Image (spheres, rainbow, N blue to C red):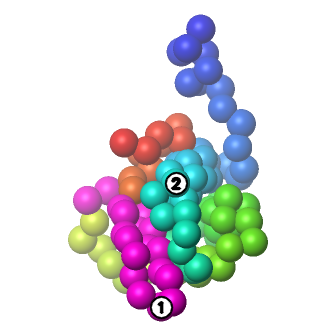
Amino acid sequence: MESLKQLYKVGHGPSSSHTMGPEYASHYFLDVAPDADSYKVILYGSLALTGKGHLTDVSIKEVFDTRVVDIVFNVEEKDLPHENTMDFIAYKNNIQLGKKRYYSIGGGEIP
């Protein structure tokens, strides 16, 4: 039964790697830095190139809810460890509290 749950997942947009993966990464990062007063998410590779059309930013903003989150679509960086790379950064009083990199490898999976 676990395998069926892995095959069929419901999320926003046409691509689980562009919506579910970033959504899960957003939840994970909020657990790491819940007390920040602002956040920045930098999307690279395919997420930066097609994220708007795939609703990547919408998925992330829904998780951050009323928190301040700046989403950057970095289409310039090409030397990436994975095509769906994301950096999450937390700030408090304009001082960086933490940073974490995630990879959306498909099917909503974040290794």
Q: Secondary structure at mark 2?
A: helix
Q: Main secondary structure of the magenta part?
A: strand
Q: Is residue 79 left or right of residue 99?
A: left
- Label for residue 1? none
- Label for residue 31? 2
Q: Is residue 91 above or below residue 85?
A: below
Q: Which residues are magenta?
A: 81-101
Front residue of 56/91: it is 91
Q: Which residue does the image show at 43% across and 44% down from the upper left?
A: 110
Q: Which residue does the image show at 47% across and 74% down from the upper left?
A: 90
Q: Residue at the bottom extreme?
A: 94
Quarter of the N terminus within the rendering: top right
Q: Secondary structure at mark 1?
A: loop
Q: Is residue 63 left or right of residue 70?
A: right
Q: Which residue does the image show at 71% across and 36% down from the upper left?
A: 10
Query: How would you rate the neighbour count of disc 2 (Cα within 10 Å): few for under 14, some for 14-19, many for 20 or more?
Result: few
Q: Which residue does the image show at 28% across and 66% down from the upper left?
A: 80
The answer to whether residue 58 shows anywhere in this view is no
Q: Amino acid at mark 1?
A: Asn
- Ranked by sequence position, the earlier of labels 1 and 2 is 2
Q: Which residue is mark 1?
A: 94
Q: Position of residue 50 (x, y in %)?
A: 57, 67
Q: Is residue 99 above or below residue 1?
A: below
**Within the image, what quadrant is residue 89 found in?**
bottom left
In magenta stretch: residue 89: yes
Number of numbered discs overlaid on the protein picture = 2
Q: Position of residue 22 (x, y in %)?
A: 55, 55
Quarter of the C terminus within the rendering: top left
In magenta stretch: residue 77: no
Q: Amino acid at mark 2?
A: Asp
